[in-house]
Image (spheres, coloured by chain):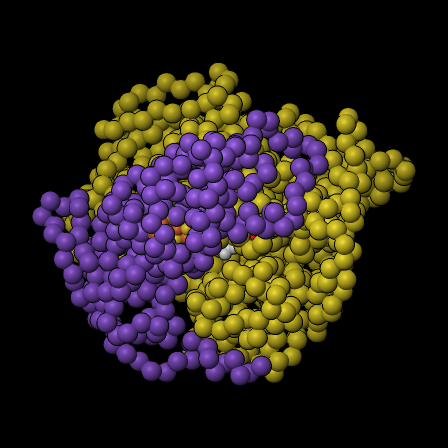
Chain colours: A yellow, B purple
Amino acid sequence: MKLVYTDVLVIGGGLAGLRAAIGVKRRGLDTVVLSLVPAKRSHSAAAQGGMQASLANSAMGRGDNEDVHFEDTVKGSDWGCDQQVARMFVHTAPKAVRELAGWGVPWNRVRSGEREAVVNAEKITISESPEAHGLITARDFGGTKKWRTCYTSDGTGHAMLFALGDQSIANGIPVMERKEALALIHEGGRCYGAVVRDLVTGELTSFVARATVIATGGYGRIYKVSTNGIICEGTGMGIALETGVAELGNMEAVQFHPTAIVPAGILTTEGCRGDGGLLRDVDGHRFMPDYEPEKKELASRDVVSRRMTEHMRKGKGVKSPYGDHLWLDITVLGRAHVEKNLREVKDICHYFLGIDPAVDWIPVRPTQHYSMGGIRTRHTGESTTLKGLFACGEAACWDLHGFNRLGGNSVAETVVAGMIVSEFIADFCQSDESEISIPTSLVREFHAREQGRLDELLATKGSERTSDIRRRMEEIMIDKVGIFRTGVELDEAVEELQQLLHRSRNLGLQSSVHGANPELVAAYRLQKMLKVALCVALGARERTESRGAHSREDHPQRDDSNWLKRTLTTWKNENDTLPTIDYEPIDVAGMELPPGFRGYGQANHRNHPDTEARVSEVTAIREQLEGADRFEIQNRLMPYKHLLPERYRERNERLEEPNPSS
Amino acid sequence: MQANARNLIMNETTTRTLTIQILRHNPQDPESEPRFESYQLDEAPGMTLFIALNQIRDEQAPSLQFDFVCRAGICGSCGMLINGRPGLACRTLTSKLGPEITLAPLPVFKLIGDLSVDTGAWARQMGERLETWVHQESEPDIDRLEERMDPDRAEEIYELDRCIECGCCIAACGTARMRKDFVGAAGINKMARFRLDPRDERSDEDFYELVGSDDGVFGCMTLLGCNDVCPKELPLQTQLAFMRRKMASVK
Ligand SMILES: Cc1cc2nc3c(=O)[nH]c(=O)nc-3n(C[C@H](O)[C@H](O)[C@H](O)COP(=O)(O)OP(=O)(O)OC[C@H]3O[C@@H](n4cnc5c(N)ncnc54)[C@H](O)[C@@H]3O)c2cc1C
Ligand code: SF4
Ligand code: SF4
Ligand code: FES
C-alpha cells in the first residue's frame, strides 16, 4: 500500500483549492494539491466576465461599499444565504482583488476622462475622475446596484488562475496532476485523508492528513447541457456523500445561465449584457423590457433565464434542429468594443458558430451553469458533521449564494473562501485538536475497499453500459429537474434516477486494463454522479415553493413561513437508493436584512412569522443610530467581524473612505 | 438581421462520412506499438473534433485516450496534430476539414497514451525554471488602495498573459524538437510578459540569466512555426525579436 502523509490534503487545483493551499503553506504547513488535470486547466480558467468587489474606483461604482454588495448578494440569494458569511465575504473581496493585483493579475484600470458606453441600448458618456486614474476599474453585471465587477478583458478566470498557479509554484507547493480522489478515509466522525487513483497508471495511493479540503468545483455535468467543463462531474460531493456522515446543503439550487450558445452550450459572458447587449426573439423584438421594465436584460440570472424560457414557450423562439433558441445581439456595441473587450466571445462565435458577433446575432438559450449546493460547512469551511474535512469554492455550501448566486460572486468566493478557510485550517492544524493517531489498519481497510471495487468493476461482466445510463441521467436532469419544475415531473425523475442507480450496480466493461482506462473512469464515477443527481432531484421535489433559481410551477410563491431553511442531504447506507433529507432553519431574528421583496416581477411571497418583529427591530436600530457611521450601524444589526480570521479584519480603503490609520 | 441564420453552422445540411486516422500507442503497455487506426463516423452539423472523438470512444474504441476540459478553446488541454498541424481539437470544426482526417499526439512532449501528452509537466517545469511570477520584495497591502497602473500597460500585459500553455508553439518549433531544454516561444513570451510588468522588480540582467542563452532567445531560429500555430494569436514574432534585442544588449 502506497502511503503519503501531509498536514493538509487539498483535493482540487482550481481557484479555491490553490488559494487555500497557498494560505496553509504560508502558515508553515506541509500541503499537497491533487487535480484531475493540470491545475491551470481547471474549470476556473473559463470564467470570462469578472470578479465582484466593492472597490468603488470607477465613476459608475462610486458610492459602492460592503453594505451595497451585501444587500445585492442577499437579495440575489432570495434570502437563502447565510448573512454572516455574506458579510465576511463582501468585507474580504476587496482584499482578495488587491492581493491578486499584487500577485500579477493585470486587472483593467480606470482611465481618466470621458468615454462612451452603451447602457440600456443607449449611448452614454461616462466621465472618470483623474484621481481614480490607474486604479482597478469595474464593469456592470446582472443583479448589482453598482458597477462592481473587476475584470481582465474577457479572461478574468484565466488571469486569476494563472496568477495563483504561478504563486503555488513560487511557494513550492506540490500539485499532483491526473490524480483522482476516490474515497475519504474516516472513522468516528473524523476525516483522515483520501484514497487517490493515478489516472495514468491506475495505481492507488492513500493520503493521510490532519485536514482534508474538498475544492472540486460544481456538478454541472449531471445535466445534458451545461456551460461547465467536462470534468465538473460532482465527484467531490460524491465522495463526501459516500462517507454517510458529511452533509450536502441545498443541492436543488442549480443556476441556469441565460446566454450559452446553441448547440455547443458554451457560455457567452454576462459581460455581453452588462456592456449593453440585448436579447431578441424570432421577430427581432427586444422582449426583456416587456417582462422586467426596470432591470431588463440585467435582471438576475435566474429571472432572465425563466423569462427567456417563458417567451420561447409562447412560440417566440427561433426554431433550429437543436430546439428553440433566442438571439443575443451585441452588434449594438460596435466592432471595436467587441474585438477588444469581448474577444473571447468573438472567438467562440467564430470557431463554434462560424459567425461574426460584431454583425451577426448569436443563437443562445438558458443552460445549466452553476451549482449553489455543495458540502455544507460552517463559516470556518469545516464540514458541519465530519471533523477535519473542509470545503471551499463551488464545491461548498458555505452558504454565500443561497438559491441564486450573482455573476462575478463566484470567482470572488473561491479566492475569498480560500483566504479565510486556509486560516481556520491552519489554526486547526496547529492546535492539539488536529493530532491524529490512526492505525494503519484503518487506512488499509479503505485502500483495500477501493481496490476491491475497481477489481470487481473490471472483472464482472454485467449487462449495463455506463454511457447509456449516464446519458439517460443527463436527460432526466435537464427535462425534469431544470429551469421550471413540477411535482409530477420531479416524482418521475426521482423514480427513474433510482432505477438507474440500481442498473448502475450491474455494469459490464469491454476493457479490463487497470492502468489508463477511460471506460473504467466513467464507470466508477457513475454511481457518485447518480447519488448527487438524486440529492438534487429529491431536494427539489420536497421543496414546495419557488426561491431563487428553484422555480416550481405548481408552487410559484416563495414561502418563508415553511421554507426559509436549508436542505441537508446525507447518504446513510451504501445500499440506499435515496438520500436522507433534513432541514436547517435560517434564523430570521438575527438577520441584518430581514426577508423582503427581491425586486423582480411581482412581490409574491409568504412571510416568516418572525419577519415582522425583526423588521421593526432593524428599523428601530436604524432610527436610533441615525447619523452614526455605517460601520457602527452594521455592527449593531449583525456583528460578524469576530468570525473573521484576525488578519482580515481591517477596514478597506476607498477613494471616498480613506483608511483612518493611514 | 435574419440573414445571419444563413451562415449558421448548425443549419448545414450536407452529411459526409468522415474517416479519422488516429495514431495510437499506450506506453504503459509493453505489448503496444505505435500504429494508425482508422474510424468512420457520420458528420453532424456543428461537429467539432471534441464531439467526434467522444463519439468514437463511446461507440468504437473505449480505451482511446485524449484530453479535453473546457471544450471551448480556453483551457489549453486538447492540443494535437490535426492533419500534421498543431491545433486545439475542441474548437476545430470537422466541416473545415476534408473527409479524411489524421490525428496524432503533439511531438516533443512525453506521451501519456494515444492523443494525450504531458503538457502539464512541461508547463510546471517551465514555471519553476523561468520563475514565472511577479518578483516583488514587499507583500501587497491588501487593506489599502492598490498600486496604480497605466491602463494601457495593464492591457498590454494581459495581451501576453493570454498564453494557455497548450504547447502548440513548442510542437511546431524546430529548435524545441532538437534541444530538449529550449524554453520555446511560450517561455520567451512569458519573460516578455513579466519584463513588461512594473510590479516585477527583476532587471534585464536577471532575465538574461534565465533566457540569455542558446536554450533561450539565442537558440531561436526565427522560422516562426510558433507564431503561425498559436491558437491565442499571441504576438510571438514581435516578442521573440524584441526579447532577443533586449537580451543582446545586456552584455
Ligand atoms: C463558462 C463559465 C464562466 C464563468 N464565468 C464566471 C465569471 O465571470 N465570474 C464568476 O464569478 N464566476 C464565473 N463562473 C463560475 C466560476 O468560474 C466557478 O464557480 C469557479 O471558478 C469554481 O472554482 P473552484 O476552484 O471551486 O473549482 P474548479 O475551478 O472547477 O476546480 C475544481 C478542481 O478540482 C479538481 N477535481 C475535481 N474532482 C476531483 C477529484 N475527484 N479528485 C481530484 N481532483 C478533483 C479539478 O481537477 C479542478 O482542479 C463561470 C463558470 C463557467 C462554467
Ligand atoms: S521562431 Fe523560434 S521559438 Fe518560434 S518556432 Fe522558430 S525557433 Fe521555435
Ligand atoms: S504561446 Fe500560444 S501556442 Fe504557445 S503555449 Fe501559449 S497559447 Fe499555446
Ligand atoms: S478542451 Fe480546453 S482548449 Fe480544448
Foreground: B190 or A421?
B190
User: Is residue A264 visible in the rendered structure shown here?
Assistant: yes
What is the x, y in percent for residue A26? 51, 25
Residue at 25% x, 68% y is: B101
What is the x, y in percent for residue A232? 42, 51
- Left or right, B125 with reference to A537: left
Residue at 73% x, 32% y is: A651
Residue at 35% x, 72% y is: B96
* Above-or-below relation of B143 to A349: above
* Above-or-below relation of A264 to A158: below
Quarter occupied by residue A476: bottom left
User: Is residue A550 visible in the rendered structure shown here?
Assistant: no
- Left or right, A305 with reference to A33: right
Please identify the residue farthest to the top as the structure is shown: A432
Q: Quadrant of the N terminus of chain A?
A: top left
Quarter occupied by residue A294: bottom right
Q: Quadrant of the C terminus of chain A?
A: top right
Foreground: A495 or A467?
A467
Residue at 65% x, 42% y is: B149
Quarter occupied by residue A309: bottom right
- Left or right, A14 with reference to A313: left
Foreground: B19 or A183?
B19
What is the x, y in percent for residue B72? 43, 59
